[in-house]
Amino acid sequence: METVIEMKNVYFQAQNQEIVHDFSFQFEKGKTIALIGPSGSGKSTVLKLAAGILVPARGDIFFQGHNIFAMNRTQNLSFRKQAAMVFQDSALWSNQSLYQILELPLKLHFPQMDKQERDQRMNDVLVQVGYRKALDVRPAQLSMGEQKLIAFARAMLCDPNLIFLDEWTESLDDASVQRLVNLVWERQRNNDSIIFVSHNYKVIKHLADYIVMIVDGRFSQLFTREQIAQDEDMAQHIEKRIAL
Ligand SMILES: Nc1ncnc2c1ncn2[C@@H]1O[C@H](COP(=O)(O)OP(=O)(O)OP(=O)(O)O)[C@@H](O)[C@H]1O
Ligand SMILES: [Mg+2]
């Protein structure tokens, strides 16, 4: 098994509170792993730690064997180009237009692209996610669902092969969920590595190779797709935990 992200004895604290406790896991390259657990159990925190966005109090995080926090600038830029994240709250810059928000990652990671190429790429991705409205508006003018679509489009722009998705189907209508699920499915066929958080059991069952349950900031249980498919009790147990 090839590991894309390894978390080793990771602890995270905020305001003197321990939020993630001794979390270790090897995320397999080319697989899709769903993080599940009750509200407030630490899923978003673990996802952001895995993506190198939060700095652990203790422990290490490796991307393909390289310590994320010991990379030089070039290695870091390469990691950032390959990895992309959809945040639970979408995290779009409130003082920028959608056009500016989408243009930035392309300008950063593909400096040789001209405006016409960037516009074409943006348009392609926006069609894929199903966003058809104006780009000269600010995020506050969008619904939560539309913000999610833009956040998803931003994540896909640079053609990442390591994708972190946090509650990425929340606030979306069924057709949009289906569209995004199809896009993730295409990524799976492309052998990309996907780590996602979701409360949507149908989405989890459809996409996840493995499910990691997190309870009270700790690794709790690991389930495989086969286990869930075969064991109705376990499927129900998981569905119940997600519903919490
Ligand atoms: N920066 C912070 N300061 C203080 N507390 C924090 C901080 N970040 C997270 N927490 C707390 O840590 C716990 C875990 O938060 P986290 O957002 O990771 O949970 P979650 O499992 O993603 O929850 P949800 O399902 O509601 O999205 C929560 O109790 C939260 O209030
Ligand atoms: Mg969360």
Image (cartoon, rainbow, N blue to C red):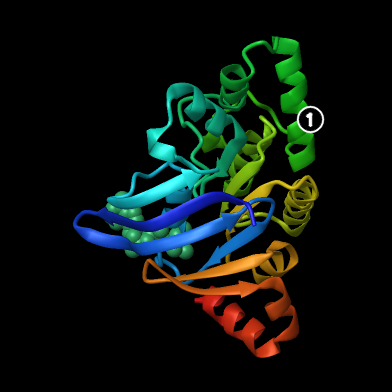
**Residue projecting furthest to the left:** 16
| Label 1 secondary element | helix
**Residue 97 visible in the picture:** yes
* Residue 222: quadrant of the picture: bottom right
**Residue projecting furthest to the bottom:** 233
Describe residue 155's horizontal placement relative to residue 44 as left or right. Answer: right
Three-letter residue code for mark 1: Asp
Q: Is residue 225 above or below residue 136?
A: below
The residue depicted at 45 percent of the width and 26 percent of the height is 95
Q: Which corner quadrant of the figure contains ligand 1?
A: bottom left
Q: Which residue is mark 1?
A: 124
x and y percent of residue 215 in the render? 42, 73
Describe residue 24's horizontal placement relative to residue 154 as left or right. Answer: left
The residue depicted at 43 percent of the width and 61 percent of the height is 24
**Residue 130 visible in the picture:** no
Dot 1 beta carbon under 8 Å from ligand 2: no
Q: How many marks?
A: 1
x and y percent of residue 73 in the render? 44, 23
Q: Residues within 10 Å of mark 1 (few under 14, many from 20)?
A: some
Q: Is residue 163 above or below residue 97?
A: below
The N terminus sits in image quarter: bottom right
x and y percent of residue 106 in the render? 63, 22
Q: Is residue 14 above or below residue 139?
A: below
Q: Nearer the viewer, residue 111 or 243?
A: 111
Q: Is residue 108 above or below residue 5?
A: above
The residue depicted at 73 percent of the width and 50 percent of the height is 184
